[in-house]
Image: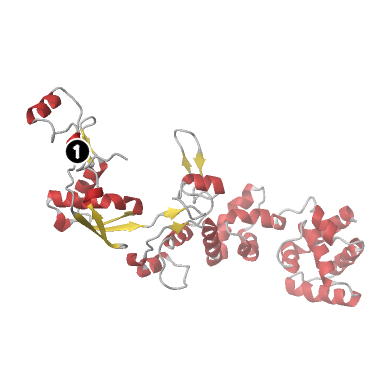
Protein backbone atom coordinates (compact mmCIF):
# COMPACT_ATOMS: atom_id res chain seq x y z
CA UNK A 1 0.00 0.00 0.00
CA UNK A 2 1.12 3.55 -0.70
CA UNK A 3 2.71 5.31 2.27
CA UNK A 4 3.59 8.98 2.61
CA UNK A 5 7.13 8.73 3.98
CA UNK A 6 10.82 9.48 3.32
CA UNK A 7 10.72 7.39 0.13
CA UNK A 8 7.70 9.11 -1.42
CA UNK A 9 7.53 12.63 0.03
CA UNK A 10 10.00 13.94 -2.57
CA UNK A 11 7.60 12.91 -5.32
CA UNK A 12 4.63 14.69 -3.75
CA UNK A 13 3.39 18.25 -4.04
CA UNK A 14 4.46 19.72 -0.69
CA UNK A 15 6.62 22.37 0.92
CA UNK A 16 9.69 20.21 0.32
CA UNK A 17 9.23 20.15 -3.46
CA UNK A 18 7.61 23.56 -4.01
CA UNK A 19 9.27 26.93 -3.59
CA UNK A 20 8.51 28.99 -0.52
CA UNK A 21 6.76 31.58 -2.69
CA UNK A 22 4.51 29.03 -4.35
CA UNK A 23 3.61 27.50 -1.00
CA UNK A 24 2.67 30.92 0.38
CA UNK A 25 0.68 31.76 -2.75
CA UNK A 26 -1.30 28.53 -2.59
CA UNK A 27 -2.17 29.17 1.04
CA UNK A 28 -3.12 32.77 0.22
CA UNK A 29 -5.37 31.47 -2.57
CA UNK A 30 -7.27 29.41 0.00
CA UNK A 31 -6.05 25.97 -1.06
CA UNK A 32 -6.49 23.40 1.66
CA UNK A 33 -3.39 21.84 3.15
CA UNK A 34 -2.18 19.66 5.96
CA UNK A 35 0.81 19.76 8.26
CA UNK A 36 2.65 16.45 8.53
CA UNK A 37 5.28 15.21 10.96
CA UNK A 38 8.48 14.60 9.01
CA UNK A 39 9.94 11.31 10.17
CA UNK A 40 13.61 10.72 9.45
CA UNK A 41 14.57 7.23 8.30
CA UNK A 42 17.25 5.10 9.93
CA UNK A 43 16.19 5.77 13.52
CA UNK A 44 15.38 3.04 16.06
CA UNK A 45 12.54 4.34 18.21
CA UNK A 46 12.23 2.81 21.67
CA UNK A 47 8.87 2.62 23.47
CA UNK A 48 9.20 1.68 27.13
CA UNK A 49 6.05 -0.37 27.76
CA UNK A 50 5.11 -1.62 31.23
CA UNK A 51 3.65 -4.82 29.80
CA UNK A 52 5.77 -5.48 26.71
CA UNK A 53 9.11 -4.11 27.86
CA UNK A 54 11.37 -2.27 25.44
CA UNK A 55 9.52 -2.16 22.13
CA UNK A 56 11.80 -1.23 19.21
CA UNK A 57 10.44 0.17 15.95
CA UNK A 58 12.44 1.26 12.93
CA UNK A 59 11.43 4.70 11.70
CA UNK A 60 11.72 3.49 8.09
CA UNK A 61 8.32 1.80 8.40
CA UNK A 62 6.59 4.90 9.80
CA UNK A 63 4.66 7.35 7.64
CA UNK A 64 4.52 11.13 7.88
CA UNK A 65 1.34 11.41 9.95
CA UNK A 66 -0.99 14.38 9.49
CA UNK A 67 -0.97 16.65 12.57
CA UNK A 68 -3.17 19.51 11.38
CA UNK A 69 -5.80 20.05 8.67
CA UNK A 70 -6.56 23.51 7.33
CA UNK A 71 -10.01 22.36 6.22
CA UNK A 72 -11.37 22.29 9.76
CA UNK A 73 -8.57 24.25 11.44
CA UNK A 74 -8.20 21.51 14.02
CA UNK A 75 -5.31 19.31 15.09
CA UNK A 76 -5.60 15.58 14.50
CA UNK A 77 -5.83 13.15 17.40
CA UNK A 78 -2.09 12.46 17.45
CA UNK A 79 -1.14 16.09 18.04
CA UNK A 80 -4.06 16.94 20.33
CA UNK A 81 -3.45 13.81 22.41
CA UNK A 82 0.22 14.59 23.05
CA UNK A 83 -0.33 18.26 23.87
CA UNK A 84 -3.36 17.52 26.05
CA UNK A 85 -1.57 14.81 28.06
CA UNK A 86 1.49 17.03 28.53
CA UNK A 87 -0.54 20.01 29.75
CA UNK A 88 -2.50 17.79 32.15
CA UNK A 89 0.77 16.28 33.40
CA UNK A 90 -0.40 12.75 32.62
CA UNK A 91 2.06 10.23 34.08
CA UNK A 92 0.72 6.94 32.63
CA UNK A 93 -1.01 6.20 29.33
CA UNK A 94 -2.81 2.85 29.53
CA UNK A 95 -4.63 1.85 26.38
CA UNK A 96 -5.41 -1.07 24.06
CA UNK A 97 -2.71 -2.73 22.00
CA UNK A 98 -4.23 -1.41 18.77
CA UNK A 99 -2.53 1.88 19.70
CA UNK A 100 0.93 0.30 19.86
CA UNK A 101 1.71 1.17 16.20
CA UNK A 102 1.07 4.84 17.06
CA UNK A 103 3.36 4.79 20.10
CA UNK A 104 6.63 5.52 18.21
CA UNK A 105 5.05 8.60 16.60
CA UNK A 106 3.96 9.80 20.02
CA UNK A 107 7.46 9.26 21.42
CA UNK A 108 8.93 11.26 18.51
CA UNK A 109 6.40 14.05 19.10
CA UNK A 110 7.39 14.32 22.76
CA UNK A 111 11.01 14.59 21.66
CA UNK A 112 10.19 17.20 19.01
CA UNK A 113 8.47 19.38 21.60
CA UNK A 114 11.37 18.96 24.02
CA UNK A 115 9.12 17.13 26.50
CA UNK A 116 11.04 13.86 26.62
CA UNK A 117 11.77 14.22 30.34
CA UNK A 118 8.05 14.43 31.14
CA UNK A 119 6.93 11.77 28.67
CA UNK A 120 4.39 9.45 30.35
CA UNK A 121 4.92 5.75 30.91
CA UNK A 122 3.07 3.60 28.36
CA UNK A 123 1.18 0.35 28.86
CA UNK A 124 -0.60 -1.33 25.96
CA UNK A 125 -3.17 -3.81 27.20
CA UNK A 126 -4.17 -6.96 25.30
CA UNK A 127 -7.43 -6.83 23.40
CA UNK A 128 -10.64 -8.55 24.40
CA UNK A 129 -11.25 -11.20 21.76
CA UNK A 130 -14.42 -12.81 20.45
CA UNK A 131 -15.67 -15.81 22.49
CA UNK A 132 -14.32 -18.04 19.73
CA UNK A 133 -10.90 -16.51 20.39
CA UNK A 134 -10.23 -14.92 16.99
CA UNK A 135 -10.75 -11.24 16.29
CA UNK A 136 -11.54 -8.24 18.45
CA UNK A 137 -14.73 -8.35 20.50
CA UNK A 138 -17.54 -6.19 19.13
CA UNK A 139 -21.13 -5.43 20.07
CA UNK A 140 -22.22 -7.61 17.15
CA UNK A 141 -20.79 -10.61 18.97
CA UNK A 142 -22.98 -9.81 21.95
CA UNK A 143 -26.03 -9.39 19.74
CA UNK A 144 -25.21 -12.62 17.93
CA UNK A 145 -24.57 -14.76 21.01
CA UNK A 146 -26.95 -13.05 23.44
CA UNK A 147 -24.70 -11.39 26.00
CA UNK A 148 -24.16 -7.72 26.88
CA UNK A 149 -21.12 -5.81 25.70
CA UNK A 150 -22.06 -2.39 27.09
CA UNK A 151 -22.24 -1.58 30.81
CA UNK A 152 -25.63 0.05 30.27
CA UNK A 153 -28.30 -0.54 27.64
CA UNK A 154 -27.43 1.42 24.50
CA UNK A 155 -29.74 2.76 21.82
CA UNK A 156 -28.11 3.44 18.46
CA UNK A 157 -29.31 6.93 17.49
CA UNK A 158 -28.88 6.17 13.78
CA UNK A 159 -30.45 2.74 13.40
CA UNK A 160 -32.61 2.58 16.53
CA UNK A 161 -31.05 -0.78 17.39
CA UNK A 162 -30.88 -1.59 21.10
CA UNK A 163 -27.88 -3.35 22.61
CA UNK A 164 -28.35 -4.87 26.04
CA UNK A 165 -26.40 -3.63 29.04
CA UNK A 166 -24.96 -5.49 32.00
CA UNK A 167 -27.05 -3.50 34.47
CA UNK A 168 -30.33 -4.13 32.68
CA UNK A 169 -29.44 -7.80 32.18
CA UNK A 170 -29.24 -8.30 35.93
CA UNK A 171 -25.49 -8.46 36.52
CA UNK A 172 -24.11 -7.17 39.81
CA UNK A 173 -21.49 -4.42 39.39
CA UNK A 174 -18.98 -6.23 41.59
CA UNK A 175 -19.39 -9.42 39.54
CA UNK A 176 -18.70 -7.54 36.30
CA UNK A 177 -15.63 -5.83 37.80
CA UNK A 178 -14.33 -9.17 39.07
CA UNK A 179 -14.93 -10.82 35.69
CA UNK A 180 -13.28 -8.04 33.68
CA UNK A 181 -10.30 -7.80 36.03
CA UNK A 182 -9.30 -11.37 35.20
CA UNK A 183 -9.41 -10.88 31.44
CA UNK A 184 -5.78 -10.51 30.44
CA UNK A 185 -4.54 -10.43 34.05
CA UNK A 186 -4.22 -12.90 36.86
CA UNK A 187 -2.72 -12.68 40.35
CA UNK A 188 -0.57 -15.77 39.91
CA UNK A 189 -2.78 -17.80 42.25
CA UNK A 190 -5.91 -19.96 41.93
CA UNK A 191 -8.12 -17.29 43.52
CA UNK A 192 -10.94 -16.07 41.27
CA UNK A 193 -13.31 -14.16 43.55
CA UNK A 194 -11.98 -10.77 44.59
CA UNK A 195 -13.54 -7.82 46.35
CA UNK A 196 -12.64 -4.44 44.88
CA UNK A 197 -10.27 -3.80 47.81
CA UNK A 198 -8.55 -7.14 47.15
CA UNK A 199 -8.15 -6.28 43.48
CA UNK A 200 -6.64 -2.92 44.36
CA UNK A 201 -4.22 -4.58 46.76
CA UNK A 202 -3.13 -7.41 44.46
CA UNK A 203 -3.22 -5.79 41.02
CA UNK A 204 0.14 -5.50 39.29
CA UNK A 205 0.08 -4.25 35.72
CA UNK A 206 3.29 -6.14 34.97
CA UNK A 207 1.28 -9.38 35.34
CA UNK A 208 -0.98 -8.46 32.44
CA UNK A 209 -0.79 -10.84 29.51
CA UNK A 210 0.78 -9.76 26.24
CA UNK A 211 -1.75 -11.78 24.24
CA UNK A 212 -5.47 -11.12 23.81
CA UNK A 213 -8.02 -12.50 26.26
CA UNK A 214 -10.95 -14.56 24.97
CA UNK A 215 -14.21 -13.04 26.21
CA UNK A 216 -15.82 -16.07 27.86
CA UNK A 217 -19.28 -14.65 28.61
CA UNK A 218 -20.29 -17.92 30.28
CA UNK A 219 -17.64 -17.19 32.88
CA UNK A 220 -19.28 -13.82 33.45
CA UNK A 221 -22.55 -15.62 34.20
CA UNK A 222 -20.67 -17.88 36.62
CA UNK A 223 -19.31 -14.84 38.46
CA UNK A 224 -22.81 -13.41 38.83
CA UNK A 225 -24.02 -16.73 40.28
CA UNK A 226 -21.16 -16.72 42.78
CA UNK A 227 -22.04 -13.19 43.88
CA UNK A 228 -25.68 -14.20 44.35
CA UNK A 229 -24.43 -16.89 46.74
CA UNK A 230 -22.21 -14.35 48.52
CA UNK A 231 -25.03 -11.91 49.13
CA UNK A 232 -27.36 -12.33 52.09
CA UNK A 233 -30.82 -13.80 51.60
CA UNK A 234 -32.29 -10.49 52.73
CA UNK A 235 -30.38 -8.56 50.06
CA UNK A 236 -31.52 -10.89 47.27
CA UNK A 237 -35.06 -10.87 48.66
CA UNK A 238 -35.17 -7.08 48.42
CA UNK A 239 -34.31 -7.38 44.72
CA UNK A 240 -36.78 -10.23 44.19
CA UNK A 241 -39.72 -8.64 46.03
CA UNK A 242 -40.65 -6.20 43.20
CA UNK A 243 -40.75 -9.14 40.77
CA UNK A 244 -43.11 -11.01 43.10
CA UNK A 245 -45.33 -7.94 43.39
CA UNK A 246 -45.31 -7.37 39.60
CA UNK A 247 -46.75 -10.88 39.24
CA UNK A 248 -49.76 -9.91 41.34
CA UNK A 249 -48.63 -11.55 44.59
CA UNK A 250 -48.85 -9.73 47.91
CA UNK A 251 -46.36 -11.52 50.15
CA UNK A 252 -44.38 -10.62 53.26
CA UNK A 253 -40.63 -10.03 53.09
CA UNK A 254 -40.13 -12.77 55.64
CA UNK A 255 -41.68 -15.39 53.36
CA UNK A 256 -39.97 -14.04 50.24
CA UNK A 257 -36.65 -14.25 52.08
CA UNK A 258 -37.42 -17.84 53.04
CA UNK A 259 -38.03 -18.74 49.39
CA UNK A 260 -34.78 -17.03 48.40
CA UNK A 261 -32.89 -19.06 51.00
CA UNK A 262 -34.15 -22.26 49.37
CA UNK A 263 -33.73 -21.27 45.72
CA UNK A 264 -30.92 -18.74 45.20
CA UNK A 265 -28.26 -21.40 44.70
CA UNK A 266 -30.14 -22.51 41.56
CA UNK A 267 -29.98 -19.23 39.64
CA UNK A 268 -27.39 -16.92 38.11
CA UNK A 269 -29.67 -13.87 38.01
CA UNK A 270 -32.37 -12.61 40.34
CA UNK A 271 -34.84 -12.46 37.44
CA UNK A 272 -34.51 -16.25 37.06
CA UNK A 273 -36.05 -16.84 40.48
CA UNK A 274 -39.67 -16.26 39.51
CA UNK A 275 -39.94 -18.96 36.79
CA UNK A 276 -38.30 -21.43 39.18
CA UNK A 277 -40.26 -20.71 42.34
CA UNK A 278 -43.56 -19.10 41.36
CA UNK A 279 -45.24 -22.26 42.70
CA UNK A 280 -44.47 -21.11 46.23
CA UNK A 281 -46.87 -18.22 45.71
CA UNK A 282 -49.29 -19.45 43.02
CA UNK A 283 -50.81 -22.93 42.85
CA UNK A 284 -50.24 -24.81 39.58
CA UNK A 285 -53.14 -24.61 37.15
CA UNK A 286 -51.82 -27.41 34.96
CA UNK A 287 -49.36 -30.26 35.25
CA UNK A 288 -46.34 -30.91 33.06
CA UNK A 289 -47.31 -33.67 30.65
CA UNK A 290 -43.90 -35.36 30.57
CA UNK A 291 -43.69 -35.41 34.35
CA UNK A 292 -47.23 -36.77 34.62
CA UNK A 293 -46.40 -39.57 32.21
CA UNK A 294 -43.22 -40.44 34.08
CA UNK A 295 -44.13 -39.81 37.72
CA UNK A 296 -47.89 -40.27 38.11
CA UNK A 297 -48.43 -44.03 38.44
CA UNK A 298 -51.64 -46.03 38.26
CA UNK A 299 -51.96 -46.04 42.04
CA UNK A 300 -50.70 -42.46 42.58
CA UNK A 301 -54.21 -41.06 43.14
CA UNK A 302 -54.90 -43.68 45.82
CA UNK A 303 -51.51 -43.19 47.51
CA UNK A 304 -51.83 -39.39 47.44
CA UNK A 305 -55.27 -39.71 49.02
CA UNK A 306 -53.72 -41.67 51.87
CA UNK A 307 -50.91 -39.11 52.16
CA UNK A 308 -53.48 -36.33 52.41
CA UNK A 309 -55.09 -38.12 55.36
CA UNK A 310 -51.69 -38.55 57.03
CA UNK A 311 -50.81 -34.88 56.58
CA UNK A 312 -54.21 -33.75 57.84
CA UNK A 313 -53.56 -35.60 61.10
CA UNK A 314 -50.32 -33.71 61.77
CA UNK A 315 -50.65 -30.76 64.12
CA UNK A 316 -47.06 -29.54 63.88
CA UNK A 317 -46.74 -28.84 60.16
CA UNK A 318 -43.07 -27.81 60.26
CA UNK A 319 -40.43 -29.86 58.43
CA UNK A 320 -39.54 -31.56 61.69
CA UNK A 321 -43.20 -32.27 62.40
CA UNK A 322 -44.03 -33.72 58.98
CA UNK A 323 -40.98 -35.70 57.92
CA UNK A 324 -40.82 -38.46 60.57
CA UNK A 325 -44.58 -39.07 60.40
CA UNK A 326 -44.66 -39.35 56.60
CA UNK A 327 -41.51 -41.45 56.45
CA UNK A 328 -42.94 -43.92 58.98
CA UNK A 329 -46.17 -44.12 56.99
CA UNK A 330 -44.22 -44.85 53.76
CA UNK A 331 -42.21 -47.56 55.53
CA UNK A 332 -45.24 -49.14 57.18
CA UNK A 333 -47.13 -49.28 53.87
CA UNK A 334 -44.13 -50.64 51.98
CA UNK A 335 -44.31 -47.91 49.36
CA UNK A 336 -41.32 -46.78 47.30
CA UNK A 337 -40.22 -43.44 48.72
CA UNK A 338 -39.25 -42.11 45.28
CA UNK A 339 -42.69 -42.86 43.82
CA UNK A 340 -44.44 -41.16 46.72
CA UNK A 341 -42.28 -38.04 46.72
CA UNK A 342 -42.34 -37.64 42.92
CA UNK A 343 -46.14 -37.74 42.85
CA UNK A 344 -46.29 -35.44 45.89
CA UNK A 345 -44.02 -32.93 44.12
CA UNK A 346 -46.07 -33.05 40.93
CA UNK A 347 -49.23 -32.35 42.91
CA UNK A 348 -47.82 -29.35 44.78
CA UNK A 349 -45.51 -27.87 42.14
CA UNK A 350 -46.91 -28.97 38.77
CA UNK A 351 -43.48 -30.08 37.51
CA UNK A 352 -40.76 -32.45 38.62
CA UNK A 353 -38.34 -29.86 40.02
CA UNK A 354 -37.87 -27.92 43.22
CA UNK A 355 -36.31 -28.11 46.68
CA UNK A 356 -37.07 -30.74 49.33
CA UNK A 357 -40.75 -31.67 49.51
CA UNK A 358 -41.10 -30.96 53.21
CA UNK A 359 -39.52 -27.53 52.67
CA UNK A 360 -42.28 -26.84 50.15
CA UNK A 361 -45.19 -28.23 52.18
CA UNK A 362 -43.99 -26.51 55.37
CA UNK A 363 -43.85 -23.19 53.49
CA UNK A 364 -47.31 -23.68 51.96
CA UNK A 365 -48.87 -24.74 55.26
CA UNK A 366 -51.34 -27.52 55.91
CA UNK A 367 -54.40 -25.94 54.33
CA UNK A 368 -52.75 -25.03 51.01
CA UNK A 369 -50.82 -28.31 50.83
CA UNK A 370 -54.00 -30.35 51.24
CA UNK A 371 -55.90 -28.18 48.79
CA UNK A 372 -53.24 -28.67 46.07
CA UNK A 373 -52.89 -32.35 46.84
CA UNK A 374 -56.63 -33.05 46.56
CA UNK A 375 -56.95 -30.95 43.42
CA UNK A 376 -54.20 -32.99 41.72
CA UNK A 377 -55.93 -36.22 42.74
CA UNK A 378 -59.13 -34.95 41.17
CA UNK A 379 -57.52 -33.69 37.95
CA UNK A 380 -55.01 -36.48 37.34
CA UNK A 381 -56.85 -39.44 38.90
Determine if residue 247 is in view. yes
Q: Residue at x 86, y 60 (%)?
A: 296
Q: Which image quadrant is residue 126 in?
A: bottom left
Where in the figure is residue 235, as x and y percent of width and height? 54, 61
- Quarter of the image containing the N terminus? top left
Q: In this view, which residue lies farthest toward the left?
A: 21
Judged left or right of residue 92, residue 30 is left
Q: Residue at x 55, y 45 (%)?
A: 144
Determine if residue 371 is in view. no
Q: Nearer the viewer, residue 364 or 44?
A: 44
Judged left or right of residue 168, residue 39 is left
- The residue at which mark 1 appears reads as 9
Q: Residue at x 44, y 67 (%)?
A: 194
| Secondary element type, mark 1 | helix
Q: Which image quadrant is residue 34 in?
A: top left
Where in the figure is residue 295, as x and y percent of width and height? 83, 61
Q: In the figure, 99 relative to 27: above or below?
A: below
- Quarter of the image containing the C terminus? bottom right
Q: Residue at x 80, y 64 (%)?
A: 342
Task: Please tell me how many numbered marks the rendered image carries.
Answer: 1
Q: In this view, which residue lies farthest toward the top?
A: 29
Q: In the figure, 36 relative to 44: above or below?
A: above
Q: Nearer the viewer, residue 262 or 374?
A: 262
Which color scheme does this rendered protein use? secondary structure
Crowding at dot 1, Cα within 10 Å, few <14 / some 14-19 / many 20+, comes out as: some
Q: Nearer the viewer, residue 70 or 233?
A: 70
Where in the figure is residue 11, as x and y percent of width and height? 19, 35
Where in the figure is residue 351, as x and y percent of width and height? 76, 57
Q: In the figure, 21 relative to 169: above or below?
A: above
Amino acid sequence: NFQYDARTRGEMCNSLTLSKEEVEQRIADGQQYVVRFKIEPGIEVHVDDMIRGDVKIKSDILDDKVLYKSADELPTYHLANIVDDHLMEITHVIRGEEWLPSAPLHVLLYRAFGWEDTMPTFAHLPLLLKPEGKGKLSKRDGDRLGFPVFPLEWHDPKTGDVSSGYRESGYFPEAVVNFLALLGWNPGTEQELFSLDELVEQFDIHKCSKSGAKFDFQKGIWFNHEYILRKSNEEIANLFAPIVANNGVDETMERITLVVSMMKDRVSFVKELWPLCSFFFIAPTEYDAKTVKKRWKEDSAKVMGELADVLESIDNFSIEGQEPVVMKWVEDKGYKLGDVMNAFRLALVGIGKGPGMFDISAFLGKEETLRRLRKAIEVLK
